């Protein structure tokens, strides 16, 4: 009789645990679904309204369009000169991101894997750059660029973009590279590898999750940056997408459908780029989870 009671108690205990786990999962999924809705709704609202006419937008801003107006995308592309804006933004973002990640990865490699005099001071110097507010440097940056003759050139924005995003890049990559065991480099040296061969063939591929993360952060920052573009670029043919969108919204405030279409088109590249590298982050994080 005692055994039967104990067995029943164990069964009841397991059922109770399952109910708690099910309740916990339900709460987690509910919170995640709510988070997705809160973040996805503004994007969905923007996309839906990009297909509405001005009259329908004024009457019904939260419903689906009765008739899809694809002409809004054509008007936005032609009126705001989106071809030039896209070209400028893609060139600036890809170039600045590539240079920042390359310099940051090399600097992080030496800061994380080598012990030398003043290494902590150099690392602290880079990290201190994360504390400098961008808006406090707009006037000095403008004066510096003017004195160097670099205002309104295709490479004007590369310098502040690289300088202001190197600290976070070095911080993330250095923290990630420090976790690698020293045995890896010792084995590579025994095989005849040099310092840079170890970096390119071993350390950098192992740092793929961190590299993908900093690439995403750099690209998003460069794509959405507005302050430096506003201060340092006056030529309409050199403007980036955020600056062009601001001018578009100021000049054509009544064409809401075209504005929404322009914002939707500007969002597509950054979402696609994020989703592409998000897969690389997952692959890199799970690659070391299975031994053997």
Image: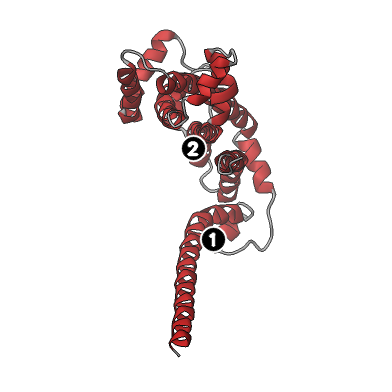
Residue that appears at 54% across and 52% down: 43
- Quadrant assignment for the N terminus: bottom left
Mark 2 nearby-residue class (10 Å; few <14, some 14–19, many ≥20): some
2 and 1 marks in contact (CB < 8 Å): no
CA distance separating discs 2 and 1: 21 Å
Residue 16 x, y percent position in the rendering: 45, 77
Q: Specify whether 68 is left or right of 145.
A: right
What's the image's color scheme? secondary structure
Q: In the rendered image, is residue 58 in sight?
A: yes
Q: Specify whether 257 is left or right of 116.
A: right
> In which image quadrant can residue 273 be found?
top right
- Quadrant assignment for the C terminus: top right
Q: Is residue 141 above or below residue 46?
A: above
Q: Specify whether 135 is left or right of 222.
A: left
Q: Is residue 232 above or below residue 21?
A: above
Is label 1 in a helix, a strand or a loop?
loop
Q: Which residue is mark 1?
A: 61
Is label 2 in a helix, a strand or a loop?
helix
Residue that appears at 31% across and 25% down: 128
Q: Specify whether 13 is left or right of 279.
A: left
> In which image quadrant can residue 238 be found?
top right
Q: Earlier in the sequence, mark 2 or mark 1?
A: 1
Residue that appears at 50% across and 34% down: 210
Q: Which mark is residue 142?
A: none
Q: Which residue is mark 2?
A: 246
């Amino acid at each position: 009789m005692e055994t039967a009671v104990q067995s029943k108690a164990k069964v009841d205990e397991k059922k109770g645990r399952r109910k708690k786990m099910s309740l916990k999962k339900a709460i987690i999924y509910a919170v995640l679904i709510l988070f997705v809705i809160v973040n996805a709704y503004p994007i969905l609202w923007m996309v839906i309204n990009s297909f509405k006419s001005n009259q329908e937008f004024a009457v019904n801003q939260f419903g689906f369009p009765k008739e899809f107006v694809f002409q809004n995308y054509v008007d936005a592309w032609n009126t705001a000169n989106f071809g030039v804006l896209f070209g400028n933004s893609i060139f600036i973002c890809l170039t600045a991101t590539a240079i920042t990640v390359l310099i940051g990865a090399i600097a992080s490699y030496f800061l994380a894997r080598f012990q030398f005099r003043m290494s902590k001071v150099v690392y602290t110097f880079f990290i201190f750059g994360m504390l400098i507010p961008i808006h406090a440097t707009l006037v000095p940056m403008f004066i510096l660029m003017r004195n160097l003759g670099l205002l309104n050139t295709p490479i004007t924005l590369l310098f502040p973009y690289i300088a202001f995003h190197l600290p976070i890049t070095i911080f993330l990559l250095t923290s990630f590279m420090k976790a690698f065991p020293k045995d890896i480099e010792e084995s590579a040296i025994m095989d005849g590898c040099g310092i840079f061969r170890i970096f390119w063939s071993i350390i950098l591929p192992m740092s793929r999750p961190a590299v993908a993360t900093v690439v995403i952060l750099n690209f998003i920052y460069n794509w959405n940056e507005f302050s430096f573009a506003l201060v340092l670029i006056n030529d309409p043919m050199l403007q980036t997408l955020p600056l062009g969108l601001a001018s578009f919204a100021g000049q054509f405030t009544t064409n809401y459908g075209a504005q929404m279409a322009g914002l939707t088109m500007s969002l597509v590249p950054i979402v696609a780029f994020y989703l592409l590298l998000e897969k690389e982050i997952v692959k890199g994080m799970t690659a070391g989870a299975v031994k053997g």
